[in-house]
Image: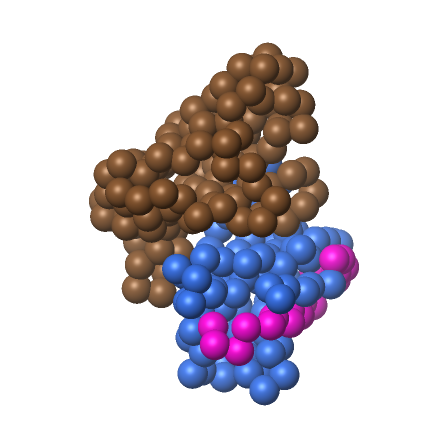
Chain colours: A brown, B blue
Amino acid sequence: GAVVSQHPSWVICKSGTSVKIECRSLDFQATTMFWYRQFPKQSLMLMATSNEGSKATYEQGVEKDKFLINHASLTLSTLTVTSAHPEDSSFYICSTHGQGEQFFGPGTRLTVL
Amino acid sequence: GEDVEQSLFLSVREGDSSVINCTYTDSSSTYLYWYKQEPGAGLQLLTYIFSNMDMKQDQRLTVLLNKKDKHLSLRIADTQTGDSAIYFCAERYDNQGGKLIFGQGTELSVKP
């Protein structure tokens, strides 16, 4: 299956700063990328769907101006958490799919102090 | 609406079978998935089933799909302590770009 990497694997930042998370599809052309987040002891919740070269579609309740998604190429999608606050602390996971399979990145753990 | 439901906890003894149940809402889904997540780790795909199948077996894992009732189950035979984890079922929404909607997760505890 496809390999999806994320960078960084964990990040700690101060409240009010912005954090960029990269998601790379290493051996697969990812036309669609999904961004999920998972709060402690909860399930994965879809934040947004991005298609290469177009604007992301955000799920209800997710602020598009706070969570900026860029999917400029078939191998790279980025999620930027702008003006992060402690309540944004979560596990962020990207995913792509092909031929019935879903390929998940290993996740990025964000802690906002 | 989009909803996938699971029971939250399951406790079994080592060597017994575990059955984790899941109900979903979108009857047009083509794929349904089972993932395992250990503490602090990412998701591990266990298996998936195509919607035109009723059953799929892969070593100790058996997936049963009842499309009429929109019910999915995962049976783990000869459950081991290493199987202790959270198990998520997920439904794929093909009419919305293939996004997955996850259940709440079932925490499986295996006692020696």
Residue B41 vertical position relative to residue B100 in the rendered view, above or below: above
Quadrant housing residue B12: bottom right
| Residue placed most toward the observer, A30 or B89 | A30
Q: Is residue A16 visible?
A: yes
Q: Is residue B25 magenta?
A: yes
Residue A36 vertical position relative to residue B17 in the rendered view, above or below: above
Quadrant housing residue A13: top right
- Please tell me which residue is depicted at 58% across the width and 49% down the height of the picture: A60
| Residue placed most toward the observer, B19 or A27 | A27
- Please tell me which residue is depicted at 57% across the width and 41% down the height of the picture: A62
Q: Position of residue A30 (x, y in %)?
A: 28, 48
Q: Pick the quarter of the image with the N terminus of chain A.
A: bottom left
Q: Position of residue B50 (x, y in %)?
A: 42, 75
Q: Is residue B41 visible?
A: no
Q: Position of residue A53 (x, y in %)?
A: 26, 43
Residue furthest bottom in the image: B68
Q: Is residue B86 magenta?
A: no
Segment tinted magenta in the rendering? B8-29
- Please tell me which residue is depicted at 52% across the width and 65% down the height of the picture: B91
- Please tell me which residue is depicted at 61% across the width and 71% down the height of the picture: B24
Residue B35 vertical position relative to residue A18 in the rendered view, above or below: below
Q: Position of residue A113 (x, y in %)?
A: 65, 16
